Image (tube, helix red, strand yellow):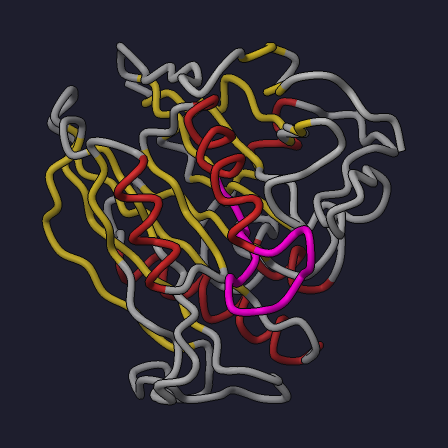
Amino acid sequence: MTRCAGLVVAGVALLGSGSLSIPSQDDTLRVMSFNVRLGVVNDGDDSWVHRKDLLVKTVRGFGPDVLGTQEAYDFQATYLLKELNGYAHVGWPRSQDPRDGEQCAILYREDRFEKRNAGQFALSETPDVPGSMGWDAAYARIVTWVRLRDRRTDAELLFVNTHFDNRGERARLESARLLRARLRELAPEGAWIVTGDFNSPEGGPPYEALVSAPGADGNALVVVDSFRATHPVRGDDEGTLNGFSGERSGDRIDWILHSTLFEAISAEIDHTEDEGRFPSDHFPVNAVLRWRD
């Protein structure tokens, strides 16, 4: 593995501890999705305590207006809030088991957004039963959502963050169908953004069920994949699960999706590293979206 000197964020070198933060100054929205790798496991040199500062620098380097995280425990979300000034947090543990504190936490800029309401539902046959497990899933899985008023445009949007099961094939497919149905219920006006680790490749059954042709499931919802919208030709370096190795091949399983009320200006897989060390076992993904008139 090639090791490089210094910290590189999306091709921009950052020196010292003060990372570059570029909040949007117009009606664009900077969105990031980041599986931060649960901080309660022993990953040796890649354990949370050794990489948390690099993870914060990675987030600062993009400067998201809204950040969807996966696998964040409360102490990880608390650390992010402490180090990333000006953000508020939405999130609850996925399980009723007090030993399982994983969240699909959402962080948003308080100077940009006003929170209207928020909630969470289970990815199961009984989505309104907290902690319920669905189908053949190995773990309880959830969707966290927040409704935000954009102070710059006075428009409201629904921001949704999720993490599909890593084992259950049927669970991933049914979760995609449930999420698609709930988008219409939660955001009938059609302004929504979805982030997540979907544990499924582009073109797989969950992807097709979620990002399907309008009307294919009786639901005319149009779901746009921001990365594919801005990179129409598929490459061989689009993998987002790197296992702390920096490997870029494999499947793109982390997505930022949005409704047609937004236009994707850019979307990237963030390969930030510091001398061959990585902030997580996933590459974060980001997108710059713009409200359509």
Give the x, y percent position of residue 32: 46, 36
Give the x, y percent position of residue 175: 53, 71
Which quadrant is home to the N terminus? top right
Tell me which segment is drawn in magenta: 33-47
Name above or below for residue 63 compared with residue 237: above
Give the x, y percent position of residue 114: 11, 38
Q: Nearer the viewer, residue 117 or 274?
A: 274
Name above or below for residue 4 compared with residue 145: above
Q: Nearer the viewer, residue 223 or 101?
A: 101
Q: Quadrant of residue 199?
A: bottom right
Which quadrant is home to the C terminus? top left
User: Which residue is depicted at the point 74% across and 54% down?
Assistant: 201
Q: Was residue 34 drawn as part of the magenta stretch in this picture?
A: yes
Determine whether, in the image, residue 51 is placed left or right of residue 130: right
Determine whether, in the image, residue 255 is placed left or right of residue 146: right
Q: Nearer the viewer, residue 224 or 70?
A: 70
Q: Quadrant of residue 18?
A: top left
Determine whether, in the image, residue 176 is placed left or right of residue 158: right
Query: Tag count in the figure?
Result: 0
User: Which residue is depicted at the point 24% across and 55% down?
Assistant: 90
Magenta stretch prevailing secondary structure: loop
User: Which residue is depicted at the point 54% across and 54% down?
Assistant: 48
Give the x, y percent position of residue 179: 45, 64
User: Which residue is depicted at the point 77% across and 42% down?
Assistant: 239
Q: Was residue 220 drawn as part of the magenta stretch in this picture?
A: no
